[in-house]
Amino acid sequence: MKKEMNGTKSCKHCQTEIPVAAKVCPNCRKKQGMGCLPKIFIVVVIIIILAVIGSMGSGDSSDLEDNSNSTTNTQIEMNDNTEAEEEEDIPTEYKSALNKAKSYSDQMFMSKKGIYNQLTSSYGEGFSEEAAQYAVDNLDVDYKENALHKAKEYSDQMAMSKKGIYNQLISSAGEQFTEKQAQYAVDNLEADYNANALQKAKEYQTQMDMSPSAIYDQLTSSYGEQFTEEEAQYAIDHLD
């Protein structure tokens, strides 16, 4: 490229000497590009603008987050206050009934219906029906697990059969669990029913002097122990 002289420059396209201020070459009629300095200036300006926009966006995000946290905290405080006010509105009888219901569930593993009946019974707690209903409706308990605890007690302490335990759990004169709760209990109960049948057979033999055939019938009877035939036969085969 030719060396630029005072007041002139070389055309970037045809290399003809043209005035420094010329934006279009008189010879080839093509536009002359910007120099390096203008380009650098534009790039710097763009970087500054982007930095300012980014800074503003970050500040807005922080403000929004602070406002969001403040709103959440306010909502939590309002909920706490509402719960406290609701707690104050609950009659003392209702609170007492709920405490009693929790005791019956935690210590005796009773069913929902069993707890309600005990709370309202004139031979039990004598609470009003409204207080008892509030108690069982607000009691946090897994009745399936209560039924399982009861089933284990009947197996360990009374050597009952699987069917006998189930019927006792759902009986209106018994535990009054639902069929689903009772089924869960017997399905998850780890019990040796052969051993239970043998224990019952020994009781009939020693306490009532019953014959093996009579014991077998009692063990399998739907009005008796309700063991399976296999469990009853195991018991007879292992009697002394």
Image (tube, rainbow, N blue to C red):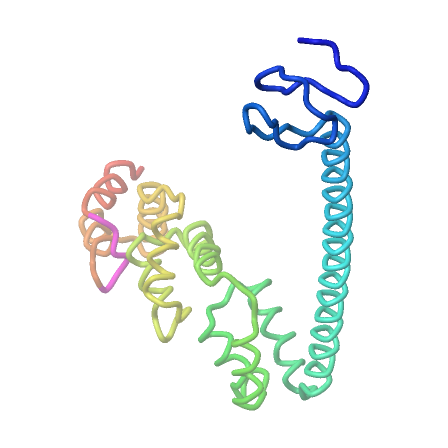
Q: Residue furthest right?
A: 6
Q: Nearer the viewer, residue 104 or 206?
A: 104
| Residue 47 sits in quarter | top right
User: Quick check: is 148 in the magenta stretch?
Assistant: no
Residue 76 horizontal side relative to residue 238, left or right: right
- The segment highlighted magenta reads 223-228
Q: Main secondary structure of the magenta part?
A: loop
Residue 16 horizontal side relative to residue 141, left or right: right
Residue 228 horizontal side relative to residue 88, left or right: left
Q: Nearer the viewer, residue 205 or 174?
A: 174
Q: Position of residue 185 (x, y in %)?
A: 39, 54
| Residue 63 sits in quarter | bottom right
Q: Where is residue 145 in the image (x, y as percent from the top left)?
A: 47, 56
Q: Is residue 16 above or below residue 74?
A: above
Q: Quadrant of the C terminus?
A: top left
Q: In which quarter of the image is the N terminus?
A: top right
Q: Where is residue 165 in the image (x, y as percent from the top left)?
A: 35, 58
Q: Residue at x 77, y 28 (%)?
A: 37
Q: Which residue is drawn at 57% across and 23% down?
A: 27
Q: Which residue is drawn at 56% across and 91% down?
A: 128
